[in-house]
Amino acid sequence: MSSTSDRPPTGAPPPLGDGYVLVSNSDDFAALRRTFRRFVFPMTALFLLWYALYVLLSNYAHGFMSTKVAGNIHLGLVLSLLQFVSTFAITILYARWADHTFDPAAAELSERVLAHGISEREQS
Amino acid sequence: MSMQISAAAAVGRPGVNIAIFAGFVVVTLAIVLKVSRRNASATDFYAGGRNFTGAQNGVALAGDYLSAASFLGIAGAIAVYGYDGFLFSIGFLVAWLVALLLVAELLRNTGRFTMADVLSFRLRQRPVRTAAGISTLIVTFFYLLAQMAGAGGLVALLLGIESKSGQGLVIAVVGLIMIAYVLIGGMKGTTWVQIIKATLLVIGAGVMTFWVLSKYGFNLSSLLGDAVDKGGKGGAALLDPGKQYGKTSVTKLDFLSLGLALVLGTAGLPHVLMRFYTVPSAREARRSVVWAIWLIGIFYLFTLILGFGAAALVGPTKILGAPGKVNSAAPLLAYELGGTILLGIIAAVAFATILAVVAGLAITASASFAHDVYNTVIKKGKVSGEEEVRVARITVVVIGVIAILGGILANGQNVAFLVALAFAIAASANLPTIIYSLFWRRFNTRGALWSIYGGLGSCLVLIAFSPVVSGKAPVAGKSPSMFTDPSIDFHWFPLDNPGLVTIPLSFVLGIVGTLSSRERSDDAKFAEMEVRSLTGAGAEKPVQH
């Protein structure tokens, strides 16, 4: 289904729940999902691998981690602090990307869903 | 991080410690009373009306997360084990990226009050909700027990109460104050308690960090050097990995297991997930995680300095000789730096930490029982919001009593084991189903049930037959296991933490269960869940006052 068919219908109200299914099948939503997954999945893989590398080095490469860098500061401590740096960096990157790239596209699609009407799901 | 209490005098003046803590309780109770005049509806009671800002909820998340195990446990672990202790901080922090990238916003958009709302969204309601409710209650129970047991150890150190019955009385008082917070304040009051406590905790740790660093001319290297010198024979090993976990290939596997449970556990902790419903939108949920990551990250950097500061200024011999052992490093450092008053403040903050975390856990467990088990499963969703809240309030009292009794029984038990168990269960029982139901269209009810019950059951069985329960090599005639009698030994699983086995197992069970069932996923509901989770259309709105 193409995005042009997603215009709110005139006349009779659409069947309940129609909005979600309609938007779900639209190209624009497929694009939004792709945008989301293309950012979030590689980023998750990246930080998990970097964390795994750090844990494995700490566990199985004691000599390497004990390399002196400056005074009493060893390579292990430097890599530990880099875990903090990378966590903060990914947080900043994600928040900026989500605010500027993802939110506007998501908001536009959200309006389209609501314009079609949604079912009041039995939620308990 | 054992919490065995040995008879020894308190540090500082117990009167000062009690007075400062009492001041905290009076001020927070007054605030709770003031903010919570409206608490009738379920949205008010469970989610604070969804009117907290991202920043407020972020501070509260930090408050929920930085438990006594974080503050006392990690500072102590670094003081005694050095580098290996710091690995806890890193796992606990990096874990937040899972919540930020994969879970927080999607959960806020999809659910209403509990984790089970999301897990059961497009699957068969009653069986999945029952499973999610049970795993919520079990994770919360172990976390709760750890906090209450920790209170016992603190009491010995800070208030000079040596008798078990006296400590039991203090645990009961902590439990009763917690019940009052939650009954009066609901989620709104609990959130404010978290905000105040997190602010005090981060400021307190920050002041101590600054103080320690100023003693060493803000030179990290000379602080580390002094910690090594004070450590005597074992001092040099502080700076390098392996002091705690590097002994054998089994302890190394245990470390991998712990690392996995820590990084995947956070995004499956029900009391963390429930906080995402207290904000008006997914955007604010994102803000709150960003705030939480900054606060928690900065706090863990402080623990590095506090830990090595305690090693350098107090010394491991004195720390391990104190009542509360490793957990006493931070309070002893406070006493060394600022005497009675600073110790009193830090002691009060530590108590406030336990109190606030326990309140957060109680509201999560009561919401899950009233909303998931009582209303949806037992009453088939026919109960009004008011009636549900009434049941939730009764549940809070029951949970409070269980926590008090459990805390008295667990007094003296190893706190880290209980917390690590809660993380391992959360990562095994909850996270796979959260991820699959958000991202995998084919996922179905059997997959969810196999994953939740399989993860939960395998965790409990492996822990029961692990060395934390029985069979650790005795030290001075007493085994460090839960059964201290060395002749009791029924362990056959070699690792302390089961995560390395149970987390992959649960992910696999989710796939096998799904593929072996003929149940087709409900395409309309998946469409609704996917569109709603990403766009926020139809997400729960905040209460208008």
Image (spheres, helix red, strand yellow):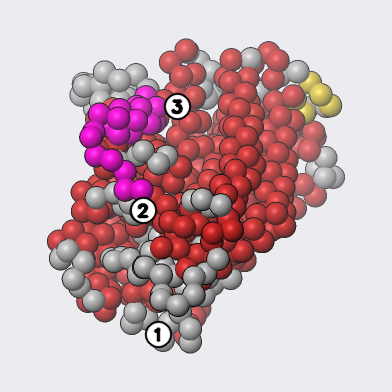
Q: From where the camera sits, is residue A59 visible?
A: yes
State the separation of the CA atoms marked 2 and 3: 39 Å
At x 40% / y 85%, what residue is drawn? B38
Disc with the residue nearer the chain's start (2 vs 3)? 3
Residue topped by disc 3:
B257
Residue B385 in the image: above or below residue B453 = below
Asked if residue B509 is among those painted magenta in the image, a careful observer would answer yes
Which element is circle 2 on? Answer: helix
Q: Residues within 10 Å of mark 3 (few under 14, many from 20)?
A: many
- Residue B476 is situated, as x and y percent measured from the top left of the image, at 36, 24
Which element is circle 3 on? Answer: helix
Residue topped by disc 2:
B524
Could you tell me how many numbered marks the image carries? 3
The chain carrying label 3 is B
The answer to whether dots 1 and 3 both sit on one chain is yes
At x 23% / y 33%, what residue is drawn? B517
Residue topped by disc 1:
B38
Disc with the residue nearer the chain's start (1 vs 2)? 1
Q: Which residues are magenta?
A: B501-524
- Magenta span dominant secondary structure: helix
Q: Amino acid at mark 1?
A: Arg
> Looking at the rendered structure, which numbered label has been put on residue B149?
none
The picture quadrant where one finds residue B238 is top right
The chain carrying label 1 is B
- Residue B185 is situated, as x and y percent measured from the top left of the image, at 40, 76
The answer to whether dots 2 and 3 both sit on one chain is yes
Q: Is residue A54 left or right of residue B427?
A: right
In the image, B452 versus B296, the foreground residue is: B452
Q: Residues within 10 Å of mark 1 (few under 14, many from 20)?
A: some
Q: Amino acid at mark 3?
A: Ser
The chain carrying label 2 is B
In the image, A121 versus B157, the foreground residue is: A121
